[in-house]
Amino acid sequence: MGTGEYAARLVKSYIGEVFAYAIITKRASINPTYILRDYIEFPAHEHAKPMEAQERSNILKNITDSGSTLSTKNAARALLYSMLRTIEVRRGLKSYINWDDQTWTIPVASKKQLKAGQRNMKKNRIHIVPLSTQMMAIIQEQFEAYPDSPYIFPGRNGMMGSGTLYHLLRRVGFSLNSQ
């Protein structure tokens, strides 16, 4: 986002809704935004290319050699294997793991969490993530290494810090687009 075309479409949409209401309530007879319906085009969107096998191998090796804590390295690997967002990995609790079904269930955030501006995932709904053999091994290692922490990937004082994973991934050559 951030281009003029996106802003123009958004503004056109808002104005169109106002005029639609005006027409319904008989305060206007036409919607002047209708003429712009095909005029504003979105710019071409360039999608990220998938990683090559060599790139994946290099990133995993660089994570291993990074000098970060075990928890940070494993959290970075978990991001790559699960495609979860960093906040979902950082807030992941051990109680979310189902060993029998090999799943990670991210629950809906409580009303208290929502009031504090915290969601467990982008859209506040239950999310069940099937876990690969690699992910199960990472989680098992975390449970054994940090038995007293409620978090799967703890930081020094509880939950892992917000910039920890971003800094590590940037250092090892993996760029994250802000979303």
Image: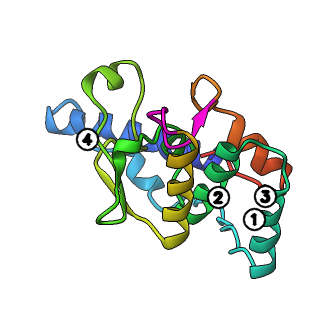
Look at the numbered discs 1 and 3 and tell me whether their residues touch, using CB distance below 8 Å: yes
Magenta run includes residue 152: yes
Residue at image position (29%, 20%) is: 112
Among numbered discs 3 and 2, the one appearing first in the sequence: 3
Q: What is the C-alpha distance between the residues marked 4 and 1?
A: 54 Å
Q: Amino acid at mark 4?
A: Ala
The residue where tag 2 is placed is 77
Among numbered discs 4 and 1, the one appearing first in the sequence: 4
Q: What is the C-alpha distance between the residues marked 1 and 2?
A: 7 Å
Single out the mark in the foreground, 4 or 1: 1
Residue at image position (60%, 22%) is: 157
**Mark 3 residue element:** helix
Single out the mark in the foreground, 1 or 3: 3
Q: Amino acid at mark 2?
A: Arg
The residue where tag 4 is placed is 20
Instruction: Spot the residue most to the bottom.
Output: 53
Look at the numbered discs 1 and 2 and tell me whether their residues touch, using CB distance below 8 Å: yes
> Callout 4 environment at 10 Å: few (<14), some (14 to 19), or many (20+)?
some
Among numbered discs 4 and 2, the one appearing first in the sequence: 4
Q: What is the C-alpha distance between the residues marked 3 and 4?
A: 57 Å
Single out the mark in the foreground, 3 or 2: 3
The residue where tag 3 is placed is 64
Look at the numbered discs 4 and 1 and tell me whether their residues touch, using CB distance below 8 Å: no
**Mark 2 residue element:** helix
The residue where tag 1 is placed is 60
> What is the span of residues highlighted in magenta in the rendered image?
147-155
